[in-house]
Amino acid sequence: MNPLIYNIPAHRLPDDRAGGLIVRASDPAALIAALEPEDPERVIAVQLLNLGADSEPLNAWAPGLPIELVMRDPAAEFPLLYRHTNLLDNHPVRVAIAVAPDFGKAVKTAVALDFAVRLEPGQPDPALIEELATVLEFYLRQPTVAQPVEYFHGALLGFYHAEPIPLWLILDENPNVVRYIADDGAESLSGRLAGAHLTIVPDADLPTWIEQTLATAEDCRTCEFLKSCGGYFKWPRFDYDCVGVKRVFGLLQEAAAELRRDLEAVPADQGP
């Protein structure tokens, strides 16, 4: 079986590609119609690209199928999340939020509505690093947060268990697995690697990608957070200064150590 997963626009579903499907569209009704002839076992998730659309057709359709709401302009779009809360009755729902100015409002709204969150961090400038640190503090300290905010959650667990997880896996952008199909049918790597002129080696595992291609900068090779990042923040600009994102990784590492100390301080159960 083909292990690849294709992030594909709904109108490209008639193209003959073997593998799993993440199907994206702006119109929920058109999305359902396009998926009707597909083998449902191939469909891993769907993405709704227009938060202003009426998602009512998706409510009772394909119960259990994950839905991701894609938010490109968080400062303007975060109030639209209220329109989609009914989806939680029948689906696991995650909001993909671009790390752009005032994205913290969108994160707080999403978790308050019980949506999971996947941040799309890009290569944040110093102002966005400050907002990332503030949102991280909210995620770590706010007792009402009940849903994961990635990449914070996965990185925190990696530090806690001393088993770092590269962001390529945490944020569902494994270049060994995921391919992006553009509206015109062109195939490329996914996420931040889309459009990168990289040779695709079908049998390469992620550690090989990281070692040979994704984290070859000198500051990557000497970075204490290499295993957690995997060179993620070096794309698309290879000269990006990682000082700020290292600070955020450091805060996550400190939080994991604090959590470990707190749990170790809890007395062992002395009951029978």
Image: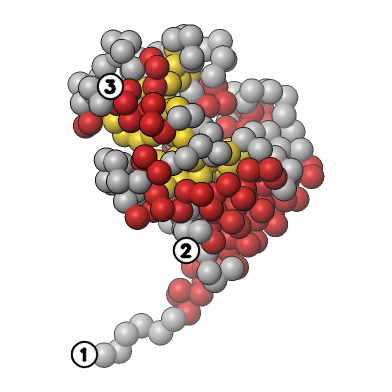
The residue that label 3 is drawn on is 19
- Rendering colour mode: secondary structure
Kindly identify which residue carries mark 1: 272
User: Disc 2 marks which amino acid?
Assistant: Ala
At a point 31% along the width and 34% down the height, the residue shown is 44
Residue 103 can be seen in this image = yes
- Helix, strand or loop status at disc 3: loop
Pointer 3 local density, CA inside 10 Å: few below 14, some 14–19, many at least 20: some
Q: Determine crowd level at label 2: few under 14, some 14-19, many 20+ residues with C-alpha closer than 10 A.
A: some
Q: Point out residue 77 in the picture as x, y percentages from the top left corner.
A: 63, 43
SS for callout 2: loop
Residue 92: image x %, image y %? Answer: 37, 49
**Mark 3–mark 2 contact, CB under 8 Å?**
no
Q: How many residues crowd around disc 1 within 10 Å: few (fewer than 14), some, or many (20 or more)? A: few
- Dividing the picture into quadrants, the one containing residue 139 is bottom right
- The answer to whether the residue labelled 2 contacts the one labelled 1, judged by CB atoms less than 8 Å apart, is no
**Between marks 3 and 1, how big is the CA–CA gap?**
52 Å
In the picture, the disc for residue 64 is none
Taking the spot 49% from the left edge, 29% from the top edge, the residue there is 26
Q: Name the side, left or right, on which 33 lies relative to 140.
A: left
| Amino acid type, residue under disc 3 in the picture | Gly
- Residue that carries the numbered disc 2 in the rendered image: 146
Please name the residue shown 48% across and 15% down the image: 182
Question: Which of 17/216 is in front?
Answer: 17
